[in-house]
């Protein structure tokens, strides 16, 4: 069974964020987030090389995920925090199936960012670098 755990990549994070941008280029994957309470306070999440999977899903299409989180962990778990890791990820299992088991040879980590209007899922074999931008 899949399990969600809170992920605190750096200290003193705000509880909720918006996704400002997602940049996927030869330098890797860069995600810029703004605090919900102060849009001038931003975070950059940088995966410095390729990732195995990422997808941004609008809030309209994540009702079953939110319902499951609510039943398993309660509303505060996902509504007052943004950063999560998923253990025994269904997405990683699907990648394994699609790759005929190649994904099993890598120690993949499933990161989920529950933003104010969407969920961003990233699967990589390493932790990203986190940088603060424009803190006020």
Image (cartoon, grey):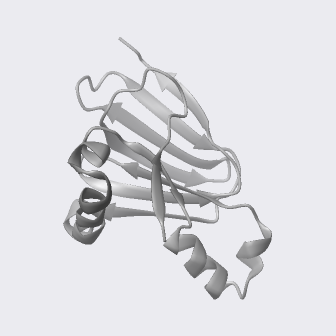
In front: 39, or 105? 105
Q: Specify the farthest residue to the top.
A: 136
- Left or right? Give the position of 101 relative to 40: right
Vertical position of residue 130 compared to residue 72: above or below:
above
**Badge count:** 0
Horizontal and vertical percent position of residue 82: 36, 42
Front in this rendered view, residue 45 or 75:
75
Residue ID at (22%, 49%)? 75
Query: Which quadrant: the C terminus?
Result: top left
Query: Can you name the residue that lies furthest to the right here?
Result: 105
**Residue at the location (29% across, 55% down)?**
118
| Depicted 41 relative to depicted 2: above or below | above
**Is the residue 111 above or below the residue 91 in the image?**
above
Residue 81 rendering spot, x and y as whole percentages: 34, 39
Q: Residue 122 at x, y = what percent?
A: 53, 58
Position in image of residue 35 (x %, y %): 31, 30
Please give the name of the residue rendered at 25% of the width and 51% of the height, measured from the top-left corner.
Answer: 74
For this view, does 108 lie left or right of residue 15? right
Residue 17 sits above or below residue 106 on the image: above
Identify the image quadrant of residue 19: top left
């Amino acid at each position: 069974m899949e399990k969600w755990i809170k992920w605190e990549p750096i200290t003193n994070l705000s509880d909720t964020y918006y996704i400002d941008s997602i940049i996927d280029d030869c330098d890797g994957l860069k995600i810029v987030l703004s605090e919900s309470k102060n849009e001038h306070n931003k975070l950059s999440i940088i995966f410095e090389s390729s990732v195995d999977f990422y997808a941004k899903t609008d809030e309209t299409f994540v009702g079953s995920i939110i319902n499951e989180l609510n039943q398993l962990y309660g509303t505060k778990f996902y509504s007052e925090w943004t950063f999560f890791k998923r253990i025994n990820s269904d997405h990683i299992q699907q990648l394994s199936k699609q790759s005929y088991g190649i994904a099993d040879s890598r120690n993949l980590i499933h990161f989920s960012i529950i933003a104010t209007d969407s969920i961003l899922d990233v699967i990589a074999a390493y932790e990203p670098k986190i940088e603060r931008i424009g803190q006020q």
